[in-house]
Image (cartoon, rainbow, N blue to C red):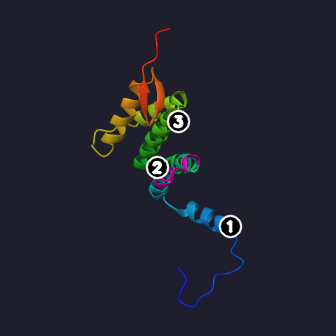
Amino acid sequence: MLRSGARRDPTCTAAGCRSVTNAVEKILPAREKLRKALMLLDGGRTERGEEVLRDVIGEAAQGNDEIALVQGLVCLGALLCGTSRGDEAKPILECALSMRRDDDMLAVEFARAKALLSAHGQICVGNGTFMKTAPA
């Protein structure tokens, strides 16, 4: 925020601001990036939200942050289902379920992944919902 009387640096271009934004993103913990991805998705920026979710998953796996990893996997799986990419979502959701724990910390995420996977024999029609397919 600029102080009263301060002037904006005329050299701050859109590309320069993006560069600063990208540098800040690299130091954000995976859970903070997950929040950012959710805000992007809520704001309708689906492609960018998906990119950030994939970053979250990679960083959480490297940093051994199992909570952010499972949350990122399930969120990405739901996004893929919501954009009619159920076949791509299936291995992601299966990966999330393979990390199942006995505590309640991730119970909601595991239940969501299980529900999405149980509908895999159906067609993703958007917003994580499915329509039964006709038997072949």
Q: Is residue 87 left or right of residue 129?
A: right
49 up-or-down from 20: above or below: above
Q: Assess disc 2: are there few (<14), some (14-19) or many (≥20) residues with their C-alpha within 10 Å of its C-alpha.
A: few
Task: Please check the rendered image and state whether residue 98 is part of the magenta-colored stretch, yes or no.
Answer: no
* Residue type indicated by callout 1: Ala
Q: Residue furthest right?
A: 11
Q: Assess disc 1: are there few (<14), some (14-19) or many (≥20) residues with their C-alpha within 10 Å of its C-alpha.
A: few
Q: Assess disc 3: are there few (<14), some (14-19) or many (≥20) residues with their C-alpha within 10 Å of its C-alpha.
A: some
Q: Which numbered disc flags the more N-terminal residue, 2 or 1?
A: 1
Q: Which residue is mark 2?
A: 64
Q: Is residue 107 left or right of residue 80?
A: left
Query: Whole-percent x and y of residue 50?
Result: 55, 46
Q: CA distance from mark 2 to mark 1?
A: 34 Å
Q: Which residue is mark 1?
A: 14
* Residue type indicated by callout 2: Asn
- Badge number at residue 83: 3
